Image: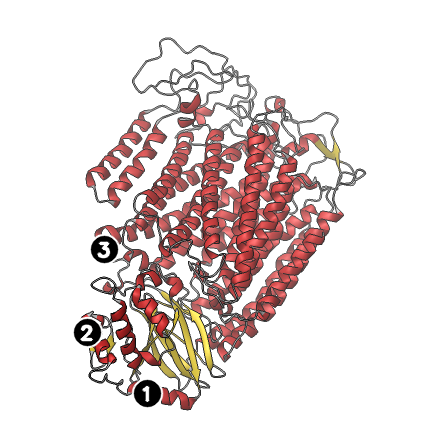
Amino acid sequence: MRRNRRLAFSASLFLFLAACAENAPQDTLEPQGPVARQIDQLINPVFIVAGLVFVLVEGLVLVAAFKFRAKPDSPEPEQIHGNTRLEVGWTLIPALILLAVAVPTIAVIFDLAEKPENPVNVTVIGHQFWWEYRYDDLGVVTANELRMPVGRPVLLTLNSDDVIHSFWIPALAGKTDVVPGRSNTMSFSADTPGEYIGQCTEFCGDSHANMRAKAIAMTPQDFDAWVAGQRAASVKAVGGTPAEEGALAFAQKGCGTCHTVEGVSEGIIGPNLTHFATRTTFAGSIFDNNDANLRKWLRDPQGEKPGNKMIIPGAPLTPDEITKLIVYLNTLR
Amino acid sequence: MAIVTPQRPEALAPERPLNAPVRFLRRPTGYTKGVWGWMTTVDHKKIGIMYSATAFIFFLIGGLEALLLRIQLGAPDQTFLRADTYNQIFTMHGTTMIFLVIMPLSAGLANYLLPIMIGARDVAFPRINALGYWVFLAGGLFMYSSFFLGGAPNGGWFGYVPLTRNLPGHNIDYWIFGLQILGIASLSGAVNLIVTVINMRAPGMSLMRMPIFVWMSLVAQFLLLFAIPVITVALFLLSFDRLFSTNFFNVAAGSDPLLWQHLFWMFGHPEVYILILPAMGIVSEVLPVFSRKPLFGYQVMVFSGIAIGFMGWGVWAHHMFATGLGPVAVSAFSASTMFIAVPTGVKIFNWISTMWKGKLTFPTPMLFAIGFVAMFTIGGLSGVTHGVVPADTQQTDTYYIVAHFHYVLFGGSMFGLFAGAYYWYPKFAGRLLDERLGKIHFWLMFVGFNMTFGPFHILGLQGMPRRVYTYPEGRGWDVWNLVSTIGSFVIALSILTFIVNMWKCRKPQEVGDDPWDARTLEWTIPSPPPEYNFKEIPLVTSRDELWHRKYTEDEHGRSVKRAVPVGQPKMAHSEVEPSPAEPHEGSDVVGEQTGEHGEGPGEGHSEEHEEHIHMPSPSYWPLLTAVGMPILSYGMIYKTWAVAILGGVWIFGSLYAWALEPATAPEDTPVHGPDTSGEDLESVTAG
């Protein structure tokens, strides 16, 4: 009995614990934007009703098990074959409860399907295993991090370059699948500036786990400044510096076959690196953008992220080449 | 062949006829014992045991895979498994547990029990029944051979295109052809059991007197019959894409990847009910026996099961709420998903009412049955929350979903199947399983199960996605993942207890026909039953036939033991004598039987038959036919057409020989005689 009660108790605690978990940045129950909040407000009463039904049913099971257990003097029980009134009752009452859940659910489904006014339009392209963001209206192409102004919704048009992915930033909105050949849309906004993380949630191959996502909400001024920076040409390497040697290595090692650096190369298989140094993360957001991580990555991209498409021709890079490349990448602001 | 023992112990005519033809591949007969006896058997009970034993071994394999997955996820950034290994193992864990464990365990129980519960001597098509088992085994071995031939399937049990179209290697091909082979097994089994239940019920066993397990299995078999063709089509399209570069799922050629998802889930959701309905049936048998009360609301239980079967076809798109179907379609499937909870909820309340005011005892089967009700409720409630589509877009493809379906398929189906295993073990093996070990098994499993899968609810709501081979620190997922991993080992320990228990209780003891004081026909015959099940085909006068033979009701409706049990076998051929008690529920339809039984034994009982019980003879052909299927598949996968053609010829040759083989070998002898009820199985079975 005690154990069962503890079970029921801890089961009802699940939500509470999940809601109060500290340092769970992908928590679905900590909405940070209007869309996620609308979902949260819809599901919370459903969780409560489900919790009550849970307590009722498990309580009845326990009561039945304890109250009607055979005792030495128990008579043979009455052979009850059913009770139509009761059975109609527990058909209708749950149906009515579900109706009460279904009506607001459908209202919210249609509500969320509406497209916002005056959004920031972004085309999101899923790749194995990273995200590309194209702000066609603004002339900006970037990867891994979705930059957005607070207080203004983004409208994402989701396309895939290869297989099905699913775009998800739980603090801001539910997920939407990124299906090749289809253009799904989703929109959301963030209440306050900050970083919101998520990840791909449709199994997309070996490194599905390594396809993370990040949205960075900024004040409108910061966002405009960021756009301006992305539109400007990246700083050209100055002759004779280590960065110049890095640029040479970039060309010699064939990095440009897959990566675009505006004015230098036009590869489209990997992320556009024109403003690489302005990003906080790289490689599908599995790494913070710093020299140590870059070194790790360039040394063995397949080991760090199995199955990704970064295959460096001519075996591993030498430590020297890596150093030069890092210097060069750091100049791409 | 070599191992042919000359005598079957039960035979009244023991001598093998001297003039029997001796051929190179001699037809196995009732004399054939040992390994060959098992390999050629067409006895539904032996086939049921082989199904269950094989599925249990696959259960251990699938469980080991689960442990590997849990070790990898026990802490962040683990390197125990590589990404591609992890993906193979999670794909095989899901595929194994669904296709090679729960489905065949249900099939095994149904095979063993359905004919007995309806008072028949075998299934309608005994050789097709054997074929179903051998094809299942061939499909399972074929799929697992991939581990040694370049790598196991790695596209998930749901196999979404275009990923599965693009993945290199033959991993996915093994999955496709393996599932096709298993589909043949399921389909043949479904047809067989449906025909058996519809055509071969004993006199008086009207549909509404059938034990509820028979009903739920029947509904599940109908679902299989209609669901398997859907996935067969989908798999054919995919295999053509992979083998012959067709464009069914080629996005570049204009295909829509959602076609696969619609086809897959149109199979996949009824599949869920295929997995749970038999377990619901088991629980509906066990609870009344140990509550000493009839099932509460039998009719409602039957019709809610049928309702689930129908509604199960209208909810598939709830697996696709995030795919962008549009608000109208999504709303429709949201509503249908919620309302399928209604017939399910009715069942739960009826189970509780069955226990209510009963006289409850708690041997292991009862514990598992109550555990089923308690755990399945949790899975059902989380299922309703998925119907709230906006919330589902947060939950789907997270561990919250993994929690949900493990509460349904493990807390539900597996708990139900364990209830059935403990309940019917004495019938299968001739002795009870050890109660002390059984209770240890239950409590370890109950605790381990909740430790493993309870935390998944939290992890999912905290945003941990499914199918990730690793996760970083700092997501708040570390603690619950560790708890879950520890829990998975507690489950492993509980399974170990079960194995020890079966090992300890492997030798038959005198357990009697009816150790639980049960209610249904299988407990009227010896444990383990003879090959022909019923010496005389029983005459059924009521639902819970055995109970009414043993008990009557006093004026308060309480059970009173009859001084002399009524309705013993003699009834079948003496004039029908309705029980002296007031008519019990469902006992008003005795006259119905003749119409329903085309060539059944309804008539002709009055004359004593001097004929013997003829059981169909064993056959090599089901086994040989099954062997051809992996051969054909290997040939297709590796595009080695000579091998494929060999496989095809092999299959058709075996089928041809099978078609020419009479159901009973001329040199075979009756297993028992004379059959006083006049039932001659040979005349009512074909395949």
Measuring from the top left, give residue A273's x and y in whole percent: 28, 77
Q: How far, Cα to Cα, is label 1 from label 2?
A: 24 Å
- Which numbered circle lies on residue B246? 3
Furthest-left residue in this view: A252
Image point 56% across, 23% down: which residue? B536
- Dot 1 alpha-carbon crowd within 10 angstroms: few under 14, some 14 to 19, many 20 or more: some
Graded by Cα atoms within 10 Å as few (under 14), some (14 to 19) or many (20 or more), the crowding at tag 3 reads some
| Labels 1 and 2: the sequence-earlier one | 1
Q: Chain of mark 3?
A: B
Q: Nearer the viewer, residue B54 or B477?
A: B477
Q: Do the dots labelled 1 and 2 sit on one chain?
A: yes
Q: Position of residue A323 (x, y in %)?
A: 28, 73
Q: Is the Cβ of the residue at disc 3 closer than 8 Å to that at disc 1?
A: no
Q: Secondary structure at mark 3?
A: loop
- Quadrant of the image containing the N terminus of chain B: top left
The amino acid at mark 3 is: Thr
Does residue B585 appear in this view?
Answer: no
| Residue with the mark numbered 1 | A229
Q: Amino acid at mark 1?
A: Gly
The front one of B522 and B414 is: B414
Q: Nearer the viewer, mark 1 or mark 2?
A: 2
Q: Amino acid at mark 2?
A: Ala
Q: Which mark is residue B87?
A: none
Query: Looking at the image, is A204 positioned above or below residue B644?
Result: below
Which chain hosts label 2? A
The residue carrying mark 2 is: A251
Left or right for B633, reference B575: left
